[in-house]
Image: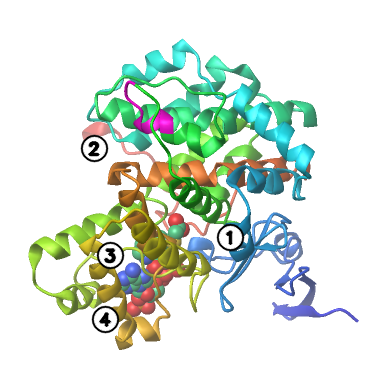
Amino acid sequence: MSDSVKISYKEKEFTYPVIEGTMGDIAVDISTLRSDTGLITLDEGFKNTGSTESSVTFLDGDKGQLLYRGYSIDELAENATFTEVMYLLLYGELPTASQLDSFNKELQENCTVNQGVKDMVNAFPTTAHPMSMVGAISFTLSSFYPEVGEVKTPEEFDKAAMILLAKFPALCAMAYRRTNSLPINLADPSLDYVSNFYQLMFKNDQNIEISPSIVSALNKLLILHADHEQNCSAATVRVVGSSQAGLSASIAAGVAALWGPLHGGANQAVIEMLEDIKKDGSGLQFWVDKAKDKTHAFRLMGFGHRVYKNFDPRAKIIKQATDEVLAQLGIKDDVLDLAKGLEEVALQDEYFVKRNLYPNVDFYSGIIYRALGIPKEMFTVMFALGRLPGWIAQWKELRIDKQAIGRPRQVYIGAKTRSYVSLDKR
Ligand code: CMC
């Protein structure tokens, strides 16, 4: 007999089934709780709430395990390209050689953006944060490419996903060029996905040489960011998509959620924190103590995770890749030594040990981005570029499953019913 949970309330007993996922995760299905009992659940921050069943990504926070469609992130980061992982996330299986070839060709054929989008980018002040530009352009993209708005059939989905994925590198690079008052580069349909992105970012008069180390590091970083089950931005994309908002509008909402420093914005915040630590000279213990002090809002950025309570497997891979990339590019970055020192001090501190706070994906990624010449204001944009296929896969799953509109309940704690008081009596 399958497991169940019994709830006693007002001398009545109600039974709810326990459901088990394919990797052994368990949940109590309370979908009839309110109609049975009148009760709702209260779970601020959704710490115990599963919002959906999903077959895209699995993570086990205790084991530090992360799988995309059943494949471990370690194997994918080591062996796959980012576009291969895009295909896997969108369609559930690794592509065959010919499927990947057609997918890559289609990405190349769709990689340019029209003049209207460029004009829009050029209307931004050069002081704008690149994330605000990427969010705004994502939101308005369906005005320029109606295919990424209304999506009803599988064919329309394929087209919309392709346009978004193909054009996103150009959107991200345009934001960088604008904030640096540089002319926008034209996409090069003859290049692979990451090389095209790199050229869009950095070429000036002529194409630049891109070393295999740079291509490999970019592929790895983008793969490691590609999906992370029901995180804040993916959950946002799903809630917005559940109102039947269009694909690009839902993605724009994901970009907005990602920007916050507790989510994707942490990668920029980590480098800023490390730069502050270096400048300040008070020593690492001082900063660790400050992070522990509850009278300060300061936290060690790049530390802690809602789900990982042992280690973040992405951080482990990125830490190792950081050493490799810096060695391959012949770069010595003393901020890396500082980051390693900070990790060591924090991991020996009882406060961090007791709360299971470890470096997360954002702790070391910025050091690789710096080595690749990507400035800190672009770090969260890099995260968005990586996360895009995950957001799209989550959106697709939601729409195929025809999930109900995302609409949580609340426990109201405001004023009780009262009568309007006219202005002269207040
Ligand atoms: N520095 C100091 N204390 C921390 C930190 C930190 N980075 N993270 C958590 N804590 C403490 C927190 O104060 C709380 O202490 P207490 O039990 O005494 O009240 C305890 O640890 C649990 O923290 P929480 O805020 O309840 O945990 P959460 O699961 O709600 O938050 C988190 C997770 C990632 C928002 C949080 O760890 C954090 O703010 N980290 C810094 C920002 C960061 O690096 N974000 C990137 C997350 S990974 C990538 C991504 O999602 O984009």
* Residue closer to the observer: 265 or 150: 265
Q: Is residue 254 magenta?
A: no
Q: What is the distance, in whole Å, between disc 4 and disc 1 at their CAs? A: 30 Å
Q: Nearer the viewer, mark 1 or mark 2?
A: 1
Residue identified by numbered label 1 = 78
**Marks 3 and 4: which is nearer the front?**
3
Magenta residues span: 199-205
Q: CA distance from mark 1 to mark 3?
A: 22 Å
- Label 3 sits on residue: 336
Q: Secondary structure at mark 2?
A: helix
**Front position among marks 2 and 4:** 4
* Residue labelled with disc 2: 425
Rendered residue at 76%/68% (across/down): 21
> Is residue 6 visible in this depiction of the protein?
yes
* Numbered disc 1: secondary structure: helix
Q: Which amino acid type corresponds to the residue marked 4 in the rendered image?
A: Val
Label 3 and label 2: CA atoms lie apart by 64 Å
Image coordinates for residue 265, horizontal then vertical, percent:
36, 50
* C-alpha span from label 3 to label 4: 14 Å
Labels 2 and 4 touching (C-beta < 8 A)? no
